[in-house]
Amino acid sequence: MNRALLLVNRHARTGQQQLEAAIAQLQSLGLVLTEEPTDHPDHLPDMIRQYRDRVDLVIVGGGDGTLNAAVQGLVETSLPLGILPLGTANDLARTLGIPTTLPEACQVIAGGKVQKIDLGWVNGRYFFNVASLGLSVQITRKLTKEVKKRWGVLAYAATAIHALWESRRFHAEIQSEGRSEKVRTVQIAVGNGRYYGGGMAVAEDAAIDDQRLDLYSLEIQHWWQMLAVLPVMRRGSHGVMPWVQTWQGKEFQVSTRRPRSINTDGEITTSTPAHFRVVPKALSVLVP
């Protein structure tokens, strides 16, 4: 497994020198690289399809958004994925235990150990980490490239507090496996992996190969309740809070009174009504 398509976001926060060193290291570890840019994320699946028979794996250098942009092509070609974490949060890398330092991430790719992971799916779009509606969509809209470049991972917390200040509860109905519940909530999130939003955990026991989705609904009424929830959200134990509802399942339906945008791995891609499901063992990834 030595021929690799390298899709790299050269505008990511990691410096050019580090990136050039990583490319040189991958080559010294025996990989034959063909590099293509990721300036137009929409083109990534087509690019991967074009190289289907010419490479043994695809290495994506970027953050969770770049990885998500490539996922359709990876699923269709069944090519294994190697990750160079060049983003702000790198939540998928964190979930998989991939080191955030590039020299170590290169060693993981060259090591060749493959793990099959699940993907989440909503309305025809795949996601690695989380798909959500409500507060997270406002955060996504505020979290510009400039903000992320300037503040790094701190941008998530600062933007969340600002968005929370402006957020209003909305009505939604959640259905899963015969259970139905009407809620007033500021956010509904459905997780496939473990980490999202710069290191928050979806659920205490969430894993990216557990063949289930973890849903939570954040039914807070006052901004101060969020201050109480945030520390437990880092651990994924927010289900203990009286104003957080948690579900687990293979499939969910979420409907709202009017269509509400949904973000998948930090990019706004679809809207309600939404059908979520887990796609077990959908992708091969190189892991430590």
Image (cartoon, grey):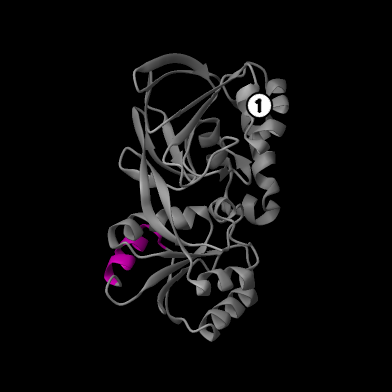
Front-most of 265 and 109?
109
Front-most of 125 and 154?
125
Q: Give, as a single range, the part of the protein colored magenta.
A: 40-50
Magenta-colored segment: predominant secondary structure: helix
Q: Is residue 210 above or below residue 175?
A: below
Q: How many labels were placed on the picture?
A: 1
At 63% across and 62% down in the image, what residue appears? Answer: 99
Q: Quadrant of residue 285?
A: bottom left
Residue 121 colored in magenta in the image: no
At 56% across and 63% down in the image, what residue appears? Answer: 288
Residue annotated with mark 1 = 165
Residue 6: where, in percent of width, then height?
44, 72
Q: Is residue 64 above or below residue 187?
A: below
Residue 252: where, in percent of width, then height?
38, 28
Q: Is residue 83 above or below residue 222?
A: below
On-image quarter of the N terminus? bottom left
**For numbered disc 1, what is the local secondary structure?**
helix
Residue 47 colored in magenta in the image: yes
Front-most of 152 and 120?
120
